[in-house]
Each structure stands twice: as C-alpha cells, then as structure tokens.
Image: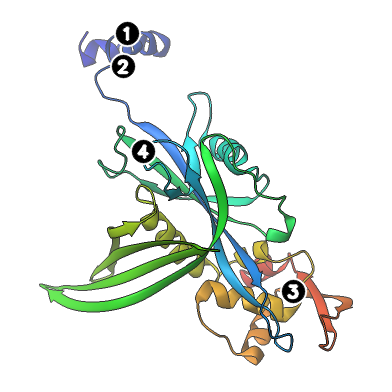
Amino acid sequence: MDEHQLQNLDEQEFIEQYRRTEKDRYEKPSITTDMAIFTVATEQGNDKRKKPEKELQILLIRRGGHPYKGHWALAGGFMGIDEDLDTAVRRELKEETGVVGVYAEQLYTWSAVDRDPRMRIVSVSYLALVDQSKLPPLQAGDDADDVKWFTVRDTILDVRDEVIGGAAKRIEQIELLLTSDDITVTAAVERTTVTEGANTQTSLTVTRQDGLAFDHAEIILYSLERLRGKVNYTNIAFNLVEDEFTLPDLQQVYEVILGRRLNKVQFRRYAEEMVIDTGKEIRTGAYRPSKLYRYNPAWVQDRWK
C-alpha cells in the first residue's frame, strides 16, 4: 500500500496497516537515562578555629558488568517500554543507589552513534540536586557494585582562540578530577565554542579518561556548566541547603558551585530578597550565634513582575 492509499484510510485503519507493514522500516535505538546528581558536602578540617569548608560532590556508581566493568558511571539505565523517562529515572536511581525523592530536571539528549559499544543507544541526561543531610545511607543495588560521592573539580589547562572566516573559535582543554577517599577518576575534555554573529555553538569531546565509563565525562561537565548558569537566575541552589540555613552556609553553596569566592557584603545584599528570617539562631562551636533563614517562595514570582 502506497502513501496515498494509507492517507485515505481512517486513523485506526492507518495505524493497524502501519504496524503491519511499516514498523520494521527503521532500526530502533534503545533509550537510557543518565543522572548527574550533585550535593554540597561539609569537609571537616583539623583546625577547629576555622569553619568547615564545603565541597561540590557528584554521585557515581561502579559498574558491576560489561561494558566498562569496574568503571565509575552516572546512575541510570534503560527505559522500559511501558515507562516514560521520568519514571525510568526514579526507578533506576532507587534500584542502583537507594536514593528517592530528589529534585531532578531533564537536561540534554546524547545521541553520538558510537557512544555505547553494545548497540545504538540514545541517552537523556538529568540534572539532580539533593541536600545530603536528607539522604539515607547509600546502598548499591541492581547492576552496581558500589556507590559513592565524589568531589568534583574541573580545571581549564589551556585556551586557544582562532578566527576562521567570520567565526570566532575558542578551544579549551579541561581536566576533570573526581575523588572519593583513596579513589581518583580523571578525564581530559576538549570544549570547542564557535561564535558567528549572534549564534554560538559548543561541543565537548573526551580526549582521555581513566576510570570513567561511556561519555559520562562530557555529561558531567555539561551538567556543571548548566548548574553554574542556572544558579545566577533561579532558586536552584536552595535544593542544596537544609530547610533552615545560615547565610554563610548559603554563600558557601554558591561558592562551591561557581568555583570562586564571593564578597560577603555583596552576597548578603543579593540574597536578602531570596530569604526570610526565621527569628531563630544557631551556634556552631565557639563562634557567635548565626541567624537562621528559610527560602522565600515569593522571590521568583516577585522578581519577574
């Protein structure tokens, strides 16, 4: 039956005919989900006179089977035929790590032809944020051998600028370093940004990796960039603090995400409309009591009026 004849059928007849004759025309890729789950953890130092530092961490699982057996990867897995993506993400996260109920948003679709050696697989990545104090102890399950929080550090080692025709091209060599206790996982990634007029396109390419599976170094760096971008204009950072927090704690969350120190006075001025004073105080060690605040849910609504 040709296309003209198909279109003359009613919809139910068309679907039945299509399923009989057309469904095998195209090869079917599999769909997976990969979740970049970030938290801000407190690093306890030996100097009791200094407040504990915070660090940005990401959740990784150690693969228990091929391919990349023994390598570290983002939590995730295949979407079932009767699931949508959000359902698959929640199921895989619970099965592999025991973690439930985290903030998550769909981020990007990864579709390179050779990204998975098993078959043609398209992955939809998610960005997730969680206050670590609200999590139960991590528990590896399903096809994961282990699950750990890794401190995330990305460093730009080299930058090269070129002009090709009317386009400006920037090539950055980036080192990704992930550490957890005595485990170190690294990758080298090349980020290429091409700007022509008002159009800017960015691509990431893994040039070396040690201990990471698939293209997850690209996904981690892309997720970091999106997190840093969104923290400047959304309330996303409040997913990384407790329900009640001090302003220094909130400032440290911003600092570990952005990777730089912030001026205390300027940050307080920036944050004052985002928070509500609870009227409570907390004392940490020998320090003066600090006021406790909570997120102001009217902030996002008010700022767009």
Hey, which residue is sitting farthest left in the picture? 165
Along the viewing direction, whichever of 83 and 115 lies nearer the viewer = 115
Relative to 204, say whether 5 is above or below. Answer: above
Task: Look at the image and tell me whether residue 33 can be seen.
Answer: yes
Is the residue under label 1 in contact with that under label 2 (CB below 8 Å)?
yes
Which picture quadrant has residue 261?
Answer: bottom right
Res 200 visible:
no
SS of the residue under disc 2: loop
Percent from the top left, x then y, of residue 97? 60, 44
User: Which residue is labeled 3 in the image?
Assistant: 275
Q: How far, Cα to Cα, is label 1 from label 4?
A: 35 Å
Q: Is residue 208 left or right of residue 292?
A: left
Mark 3–mark 2 Cα distance, whole angstroms, equals: 54 Å
Can you say whether 81 is above or below 116 in the image?
A: above
Q: CA distance from mark 4 to mark 2?
A: 29 Å
Q: Which residue is mark 4?
A: 67
- Quadrant of res 22: top left
Report the Cα–Cα distance between label 4 and label 3: 47 Å
The circle on residue 23 is 2
As shown in the figure, which amino acid type bears the numbered disc 3? Val
Residue at the image position 42 percent from the left and 10 percent from the top: 12
Q: Nearer the viewer, mark 1 or mark 4?
A: 4
Identified by mark 1, the residue type is Arg
Counting residues from the start of the chain, the first of labels 4 and 3 encountered is 4
Residue 102, horizontal then vertical, whole percent: 65, 50
Residue beneath disc 1? 20
Residue at 30%, 34% (x, y): give it.
120
Label 4 sits on what residue type? Answer: Pro
| Quarter placement of the C terminus | bottom right
Pinpoint residue 285: horizontal percent, then vertical percent.
82, 82
Looking at this view, is 71 or 128 the one in front?
Answer: 71
Q: Disc 2 residue type? A: Lys
